Amino acid sequence: MTENEPRKPEEILAELLRNLQSDNDTVILQAIDSMKSLEFGSEAVRRQLEKLSLESGSNEVRREALAALDLPANRTVQRRINFNKMDRGARNIILREIEEWVKSNLLDSQNAEVIRRRYDFDSAPQTALPPAPSLQPTPQPAPTPPPAPPAAPRPTLLQTLTSESSIKIYLYLGAFFVIAAAAILAAAIPELRLPILILGTFIFGGLAIAIKKRLPQPSFALFIVFSFLLPITANSLEETLKTMLNYPSSVSAGYWVVVYLLMAFIWGGSAWLYESRLFSVTAFGSLMLSSLRIGGIFDAQPEFYTLMAGLASIAGLGGVWLIKKWKDEKFALPLFLAAQFAQAAVLAASFSIFVIHLFEPSIPPLWHLAPFFVWGLACAFYVFSNLLYPFFLFPWLAAGALVMPEHDLIEALFGHINTGNPSGPPTNRTITYDFKGDGLLSGVTTTVIPEPGTLALFGTGLVGLAGAIRRRMSK
């Protein structure tokens, strides 16, 4: 290499690193001073400056090395090191924590300044700490105004285009254009609707999982789109299959039972993957829809739908228990409230069906057992709820859920009820039970207990049971 030929940046940085590693403080200070005119740097040089800031025995070397960390070239190096590792919001949290540690004397101020410069590379440069007091007296120079800190270098075009915020914008715009193009193409060519939906569902779901670790927020947004596409694709697939195979409605109900159950597993897994309370509630809703569809397989009575919904509510409390063991009570609360709302709707529907059947007793007697189990499950539901989130009303609700209309139980066990002299006084009324034609209990008469006595007896038992349950739960 001739004397007039410019030196390569690699050679300059290698020589600079050797000088910074020297045992001579004068050589180190000259090397630091030469960095002020450089427009490039390296990770090794920056790490050596950090070591000098902390470990050098010279106050001047420590001060100058710390100031050199704020040079534009070194800030650019640190920006390149931290690219896409941590967003600015997270780094600001760390910087605030460092300040708290210094105030609490948990971290030395010199160490804090070095650590701070690893995370504040895209903010205003920090001023160097004053030198540590020397053991020997030194003459105090006349105060001079501090030099203006050098302006941070503007990011290059490549850094701007590949930054995390830019990638988020690309993903959001890409998702919008893909959905819009798919909708237009599906409307123009109906034959391509199902293939486009299936392809789009797999693309959004796979892409959301693929970028989860590096870009969690865009991944969550893509999974939301995938969640919307999932039921739409399932509905389009069911319409296509029904047109091709012309199967009955019972098969369609079975198809949706499987689909909703699969969605519940997917959204339940996403609640764990993204630590999202929204997906836990969505998974419970899908499980509830799956349970309600079971009745359509064999044309069940309304009582069966309330029974299956009650089982789904119990399953929802099981999910609350798992989430509490995994996270905490606050994270599991939305799912718990959703299960409470669902159980209240189940009991309201069951009571409404009971009232309707008082005036239209037209269903087979066996179906009258369904409300008995619905209210029994409700009792277990509120007992379990009180174990998860103790509340003074839950024991009372558990006791109240044991109220099973005797009309339903008698109808289920003995069949038709005939009241002989309905216009007479209640004490003279007789009831004849018949097993639908076999006559085993024909002619057996009973005396009806007056209603006020029945209510008083039931109320006393209800209050006693509620008190016993409450005392047991308090222990």
Image (tube, rainbow, N blue to C red):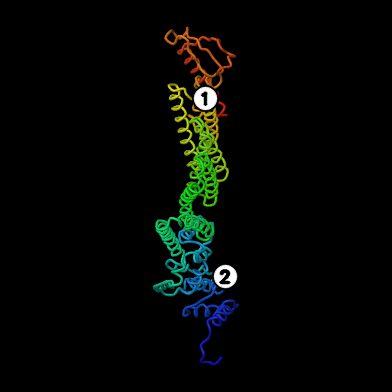
Mark 2: amino acid = Lys
Q: Position of residue 465 (x, y in %)?
A: 53, 22
Q: Residue at x 47, y 78 (%)?
A: 39
Quarter of the rendering occupied by the C terminus: top right
Question: In the structure shown, which secondary structural element does the residue marked by tag 2 occupy?
Answer: helix
Q: Which residue is mark 1?
A: 364
Q: Nearer the viewer, residue 224 or 76?
A: 224
Q: Nearer the viewer, residue 170 or 93?
A: 170
Residue 5, relative to residue 353: is it above or below?
Answer: below
Quarter of the rendering occupied by the N terminus: bottom right
Q: Residue at x 54, y 82 (%)?
A: 12
Q: Which residue is mark 2?
A: 51
What is the crowding at mark 2: few (fewer than 14 residues within 10 Å), some, or many (at least 20)?
A: some
Residue at mark 2 to residue at mark 1: CA–CA distance: 86 Å
Res 424 quadrant in image = top left
Mark 1: amino acid = Pro
- Residue 87 image label: none
User: Which is more foreground, mark 2 or mark 1?
Assistant: 1
Q: Is residue 102 visible?
A: no
Q: Residue at x 51, y 92 (%)?
A: 4
Q: Position of residue 278 (x, y in %)?
A: 47, 47
Q: Is residue 40 visible?
A: yes
